[in-house]
Amino acid sequence: MRPDDTAPFERITSPSNPLIKLMKTLHARKGRTETGLFLGEGLRQAMEATEMGRRPAIVLFAPEARARSNARAFLQEALQGGARCVETTPSILQTVSKRDNAQTVVAAYAQSLNPLSDFTGATLIIALQGVRDPGNLGTILRTADAIGADGVALLDQACDPFAVEAVRASMGSLFAVKLARSAFEAFNAWRSEEGLQMIGLSLEGVLGPEAYDAGRPTVLLMGNEQSGLSPDNQAACDALVKLPMKGRADSLNLAVATAVIAYEHWRRRGYEGQRA
Amino acid sequence: MRPDDTAPFERITSPSNPLIKLMKTLHARKGRTETGLFLGEGLRQAMEATEMGRRPAIVLFAPEARARSNARAFLQEALQGGARCVETTPSILQTVSKRDNAQTVVAAYAQSLNPLSDFTGATLIIALQGVRDPGNLGTILRTADAIGADGVALLDQACDPFAVEAVRASMGSLFAVKLARSAFEAFNAWRSEEGLQMIGLSLEGVLGPEAYDAGRPTVLLMGNEQSGLSPDNQAACDALVKLPMKGRADSLNLAVATAVIAYEHWRRRGYEGQRA
């Protein structure tokens, strides 16, 4: 089980090798669409993904990984899981991750999304209408993970949850949170059928964040960064709430607004299920 | 008062003009330090800054600004306030802001920070120990503005609040929120003297967010993105609280965590002073 220096890992040192080129294409949506893969960076994230049962398809690693027992164990498990595990140079790893400080491990994973049916029985879904910024999306996945939301739904034209910026901002939560894509109408029909109330957060809301029944299974619906919720989206909601505001700013960052309403919702449920 | 097409604005069309070069240097900390200036982008932000009494030192504008009455009024006021107002080309504006979509107006402002004495009488200060990411800092300024915090204190080695990413993420709140820099020890001495309790947010906290007296004047102290609050910082606090967590994620994005605790604090004060 413990690979030594003679372990049978492939080795690539040419930046023009097709596998290296493929990994680099994952920074662009085109490359991700064509391959169905996305990039995960860092040993810690890779180990966490393994714990959650997410096996990499490709692993590039720096020679120093051989000297670290947790890295060796990860590589061994990835290899047994069918991953192509390739030793390469630190400078190639740096060009693949496009970061100043290179990672010891960079891996590619198959993109996977959940069907809405995986949300059956949910008590809290965070739904994002047309979210545009991958950093915001990743940050929202991290928050959804932290409060134990049952899932995140991306409605209509959303940015790519598998963009490098989204994966980075999610800090591994992309692997932990159920994530679905849906057209708004189909999602709205599904949640009605399931008996979830839909609470929209809107600057045009007249109710405060405590004005709906947090005891019921709930969808928290957020509009996008530029224009908020459309009149049609608003009309589909059971209630529109807005966060209190005091100063000159008339809105909050989307990931911040989502976290504030989601934490407030969870607080009103007594922070049920919180870790000790 | 209403400038027409013959208004006496300077015109620069060469990318190698020293003023254009100077504006470009404001993307780097070195350039900002040497000039004492920072970049603000967009007509809306520039107009809001003017409303808040913040006059630009330099304004670059595209020819189309002449066709817009609000832009003309802004330029006239900037000129009267002593700004160097320069018409230039859209492509130069694009190279100055380094954005895909060029702004009609890009302005440079004198950097200014508040002394701690400007926070006298405060009921809520958000203090950031060693914040590293300018996007987080700007987002926190936007939140501090939205809840009407009395100020934000940057403690010890913080990222530059005048970085372009910080100014952008603040959405104009950099002009609205009192902002001070201080060494931790000096800040701690000041807040003790002023009678503010200091509540640290830490993963090592044992209290929930409702476990301190929100009625008292308060400093909410946040650690940095990588390592949280140091033992010394923690020891200086009157109480350490942590946010409830449920899922796999063991922490939140810094701007998100700051917003959740700050909104919870304000909620416990009955959202005092909120706008109707």
Image (tube, coloured by chain):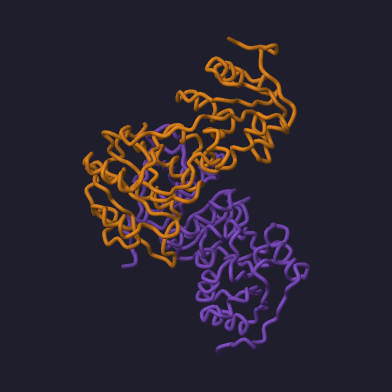
Chain colours: A purple, B orange
Residue B196 point in image, percent of width and height: 24, 43
Return the x and y of residue B83 as percentages of the image width and height: 56, 21
Q: Relative to residue B206, is residue A105 depicted above or below?
A: below
| Relative side of B214 to A85, left or right | left
Q: Identify the residue at horizontal 37%, vertical 34% (top origin).
A: A246
Residue A39: x, y in percent?
A: 63, 65
Asked if one can make out residue A126 in the rendered structure from this viewpoint, the answer is yes
Left or right: residue A161 compared with residue B129: right
The extreme top residue here reads B1
Does B232 appear above or below B188? below
Q: Is residue B230 left or right of residue A169?
A: left
| Relative height, residue B166 to residue B207 (above, below) | above
Who is closer to the viewer here, B273 or B75? B75
- Viewer-closest of A104 and B99: A104
Q: Give the answer, above or below, for where B182 lies relative to A30.
A: above
Task: Name which residue lies at 30% across and 57% down.
Answer: B232
Q: Quadrant of the C terminus of chain A?
A: bottom left
Quarter assignment of residue A76:
bottom right
Residue A90: where, in percent of width, then height? Answer: 64, 69
The residue drawn where x is 54% and y is 54% is: A137
Residue found at x 31% / y 53%: B200
